[in-house]
Image (spheres, rainbow, N blue to C red):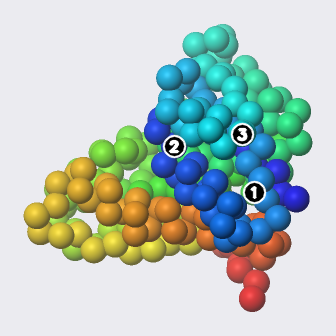
Amino acid sequence: MLRIGVLVSGGGTNLQAILDAIESGSIPNASVELVISNKKNAFALTRAAESGVSTMVIGRKGYENGTAFDNALSDALRSADIDLVLLAGFMAILGPDFFTHFKNRVMNVHPALIPAFSGPGFYGLKVHEAVLATGCKVTGASVHFVTPEVDAGPLILQKAVEVHQDDDAETLQKRVMEEAEWKIYPQAVSLFAQGLLSVQGHHVKISQ
């Protein structure tokens, strides 16, 4: 059984997509065992509780530096015997020490086609605003393994989404979530759960 831990900061729509995929059997032999938020009022905590998942709040302000914060997160996840960590709208940057115990075992979904519109400063609506400002006709989402460099880890899956002429950032965000994020994130987790992913250098190989 793959034991999953999820780090969240907001509404938890991608968390819900993962929970739904496990419930439907789309992600086999897996369970979300722990949800940790750095924001005590995150609605994702309510989603988790309603699904019977244990929750914790670990806020950055409670620690003297980033390393101590990273260690607190890592300790909580390790205490719960977590095999795979998922970032689901987690608005904090993890430092190098965190990956000592979770190398190639942390995933994130980014609302653009990496390497476009990615890296420091590209998060939430800012991504979609930038896409619209450049006049792009296509955007999408990417699932990748997380490394200390923001949005630069090995790519697992990507899916393109059309940009409509009448889009604003909110409508584009919703379409990217519905047509890409909520589809490829559970798919990537399913591949991991089945042992079908391997990291070779900066590339992810998917076994058939």
Do callouts 2 and 3 mark residues in contact (Cβ within 8 Å)?
no
**For residue 113, what is the image quadrant?**
bottom left
Kind of element beneath mark 3: loop
User: Is residue 28 at least partly visible in the picture?
Assistant: yes
Mark number, residue 12: 2
The Cα–Cα distance between marks 1 and 2, rounded to whole angstroms, is: 23 Å
Say left or right for 180 vs 136.
right
Q: Quadrant of the C terminus?
A: bottom right
Residue at mark 1: 104
- Marks 2 and 3, the one that precedes in the sequence: 2
| Three-letter amino acid code at the position of disc 1 | Asn
Position of 142 relative to 38 (above/below): below
The Cα–Cα distance between marks 2 and 3, rounded to whole angstroms, is: 15 Å
Mark number, residue 56: none
Between tags 1 and 2, which lies in front? 2
Between tags 2 and 3, which lies in front? 3
Say left or right for 208 vs 147.
right
- Marks 1 and 2, the one that precedes in the sequence: 2
